[in-house]
Image (tube, coloured by chain):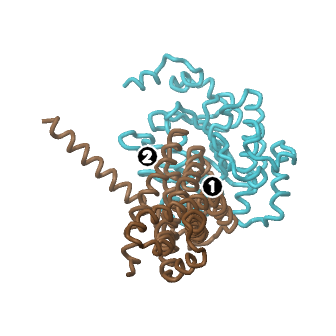
């Protein structure tokens, strides 16, 4: 926990779906300008955690503060304004099929009336260049792009409005190791250039070490470990050790059998 | 005892689920209507939805109306000739088409074409996180996705029904003239002699309501779909079936409300 006021502060966050408890009192502090990586097994609640912070899911209980303001209890307009500073890279890109790449990239800027439609394409091309994509891509449909290119376009869309906070949901899933490393480099570069605070969730340990400053492990709806991302692969915590090294035997399996 | 209680429990669960669904639909409809009037507005999206619901449904609605008018003239002749009432065929065709068959058949056709397409598109957007992505890009999905379709449904359906009315009457006229040997001038005079403005208007009011229902059910089912391709398929089926049933039920209610002697 940092001593300075965190950019994002989560306390006792709880969320259940029916009888299934997904988040069971999550506590997190993310200092401004740092990157947190959350690891955890499938169904451990990682996506629910970031969707709760984004406002896409309403938690059952707890506190989510952005810049010291509780977004769950703030007036709707203020909460929307606070969340408007979050850029999100979805697991499968979530690009809009019905519009070309450039319009996808400029979508948020157009929605916020930060740019005129006539200038939007040029701005989109500029942002696409930042993620290593040529202007020729701008007029294509998202379905005409490879998985790696779709991820880059989705990243371009997430950074287009220079967000103060960025979320990355499984940024390297479905990509080959080299393309995964390229996306990680782009993420690190974009976050550094914008000075953003970031949260990434991933199963990819190499990616976690590359893009995170700190890391946390989510298990049974709780953060059971936090530490430097660089120490993920050498952690003495038996849960983290088992998870990061992908061992079938260990305490996590026992926990699942309970 | 379980054999006795289980069916009751299942019935109770089904009733609770049905009521929950009705509640969800009512909230969705209210939120959609609020979104129609609240800025920002998306004229481009309304234009695209008008093309989808109106323009691209034109061929299927036109053909349905034309053949329905033709069949109606033939069938009316079979019955009316037994009472020497052939002269009433023109009035029966025009009143049936404008007051009833035009809006209902156009509604069912548009529901099968555009309603299904809406549910499939929104369902795919839902299961691929595109609707969540809209929210993260400062865009309210109800205003961007649902409101334009509701507006387009309300505008496009009356326009389609106007065309369906004309083609339906024309179909009846062609059969009466070319097949049944009616004098074309007399048939046309008879057609419009008994047609009143409220006959056409009541059909257009029905059309606007059906347009709203088609868009609402398409959006509602697509918006709440889940579970990948199977979920999208189920949402599409539900959109068409529920819109069709609502159209037929509302048709009776509206007919009673707009009933004139």
Residue A67 position within the rendered picture, expressed as x and y whole percent measured from the top left: 60, 58
Chain identifier, colour brown: B
The residue lying furthest to the left in this view is B1
Rendering colour (chain A): cyan
Figure quadrant of residue A183? top right
Q: Residues within 10 Å of mark 1 (few under 14, many from 20)?
A: many
Q: Nearer the viewer, mark 1 or mark 2?
A: 1
Relative to B128, does residue A202 appear above or below in the rendering?
above
- The secondary structure type at the circle numbered 1 is helix
Figure quadrant of residue A201? top right
Q: Residue at x 60, y 65 (%)?
A: B178
Checking the image for residue A158, the label placed there is none
Q: Residues within 10 Å of mark 2 (few under 14, many from 20)?
A: many
Q: Residue at x 34, y 53 (%)?
A: B18
Task: State which quarter of the image contains the N terminus of chain A.
Answer: top right
Residue B68 position within the rendered picture, expressed as x and y whole percent measured from the top left: 53, 61
Write down the residue under mark 1: B134
> In whole angstroms, how far apart are the C-alphas of marks 1 and 2?
23 Å
């Amino acid at each position: 926990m940092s001593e300075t006021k965190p950019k994002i502060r989560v306390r006792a966050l709880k969320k259940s779906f029916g009888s299934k408890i997904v988040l069971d009192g999550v506590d997190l502090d993310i200092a401004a300008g740092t990157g947190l990586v959350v690891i955890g097994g499938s169904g451990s609640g990682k996506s629910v955690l970031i969707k709760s912070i984004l406002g896409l899911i309403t938690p059952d209980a707890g506190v989510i503060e952005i810049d010291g303001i509780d977004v769950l209890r703030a007036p709707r307009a203020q909460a929307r304004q606070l969340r408007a500073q979050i850029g999100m890279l979805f697991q499968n890109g979530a690009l809009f099929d019905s519009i070309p790449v450039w319009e996808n990239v400029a979508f948020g800027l157009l929605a916020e009336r930060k740019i005129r439609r006539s200038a939007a394409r040029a701005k989109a091309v500029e942002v696409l260049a930042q993620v290593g994509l040529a202007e020729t891509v701008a007029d294509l449909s998202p379905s005409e792009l490879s998985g790696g290119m779709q991820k880059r376009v989705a990243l371009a869309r997430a950074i287009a409005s220079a967000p103060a906070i960025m979320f990355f949901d499984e940024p390297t899933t479905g990509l080959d190791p080299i393309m995964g490393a390229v996306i990680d480099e782009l993420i690190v570069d974009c976050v550094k250039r914008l000075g953003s605070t970031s949260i990434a969730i991933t199963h990819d340990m190499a990616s976690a070490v590359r893009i995170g400053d700190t890391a946390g492990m989510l298990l049974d709806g709780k953060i059971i470990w936090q530490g430097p991302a660089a120490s993920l692969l050498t952690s003495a915590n038996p849960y983290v050790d088992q998870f990061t090294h992908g061992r079938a035997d260990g305490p996590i399996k026992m926990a699942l059998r309970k | 005892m379980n054999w006795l209680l289980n069916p009751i429990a299942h019935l109770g669960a089904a009733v609770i689920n049905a009521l929950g669904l009705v509640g969800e639909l009512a909230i969705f409809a209210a939120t959609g209507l609020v979104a129609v009037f609240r800025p920002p507005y998306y004229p481009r999206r309304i234009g695209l939805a008008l093309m989808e619901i109106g323009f691209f449904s034109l061929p299927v609605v036109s053909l349905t109306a034309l053949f329905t008018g033709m069949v109606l003239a033939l069938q009316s002749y079979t019955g009316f000739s037994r009472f020497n009432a052939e002269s009433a065929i023109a009035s029966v065709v025009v009143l049936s088409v404008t007051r009833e068959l035009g809006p209902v058949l156009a509604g069912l056709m548009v529901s099968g074409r555009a309603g299904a397409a809406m549910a499939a598109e929104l369902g795919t957007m839902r299961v691929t996180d595109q609707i969540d992505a809209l929210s993260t890009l400062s865009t309210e999905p109800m205003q961007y996705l649902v409101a334009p379709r509701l507006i387009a449904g309300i505008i496009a359906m009356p326009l389609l029904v106007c065309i369906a009315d004309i083609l339906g009457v024309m179909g009846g006229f062609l059969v009466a003239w070319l097949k049944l040997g009616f004098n074309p001038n007399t048939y046309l005079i008879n057609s419009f002699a008994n047609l009143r403005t409220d006959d056409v208007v009541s059909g257009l009011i029905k059309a606007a309501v059906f347009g709203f229902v088609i868009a609402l059910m398409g959006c509602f089912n697509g918006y709440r779909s889940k579970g990948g391709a199977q979920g999208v398929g189920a949402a599409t089926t539900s959109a068409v079936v529920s819109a069709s049933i609502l159209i037929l039920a509302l048709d009776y209610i509206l007919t009673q409300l707009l009933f004139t002697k």
